[in-house]
Amino acid sequence: MPVYTCTYVQGSLTPDVKDELAAGITTIHSDMNHVPPDYVNVVLAEMPPENVHVGGRPGTPLLINGWARRGHPQDGTTRLALALAEAASRTSGIPREHVMVVILDSPARSAVEAGRVLPDPGHEAEWLAEGRAGA
């Protein structure tokens, strides 16, 4: 259901670190928002060094943009962003001062997954059961 895009400079993350980062994001989101891990999407986007700037100069940040369904309590979303930032820094070795996490939201009805409009938060069990019944 959620989509996380991690943007970073080419060569700053090894293949093993990329796998660990994606797994960590998946576990944290799944545990905190009570969705099956199979529904967490993580995209790793490497950029050439000349295409990443911080403060108008070349930089090496780790930028994590997430999308989630609107309706989760704000304090939970803040805890999620903090947990993701901490785990990303620890996993990647990129200092926390160079890690940014932004979680945007929109109504669940604005997204479709597996051919079905997503459920509002709190209605995942029914949505998943309907999906299994229709399979």
Image (tube, helix red, strand yellow):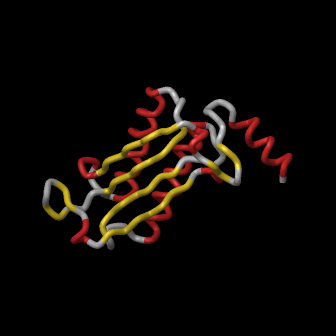
Write the residue at 70% across / 48% down.
116
Write the residue at 76% across / 35% down.
126
Q: Nearer the viewer, residue 34 or 91?
A: 34
| Residue 104, image quadrant | top left
Write the residue at 47% across / 39% down.
105
Q: Nearer the viewer, residue 111 or 13?
A: 111
User: Residue 29, how many percent across, how many down?
Assistant: 53, 43
User: Residue 121, how many percent across, how many down?
Assistant: 61, 33
Location of residue 36 with respect to 51 vertically, above or below: above
Q: Nearer the viewer, residue 70 or 101?
A: 70
Q: Is residue 93 left or right of residue 133?
A: left
Q: Is residue 119 left or right of residue 130?
A: left
Q: Is residue 118 left or right of residue 57?
A: right
Write the residue at 40% across / 57% down.
6
| Residue 85, image quadrant | top left
Total marks shown come to: 0
User: Residue 74, how many percent across, how many down?
Assistant: 45, 27
User: Residue 73, how many percent across, how many down?
Assistant: 50, 26
Location of residue 5 with respect to 106 vertically, above or below: below
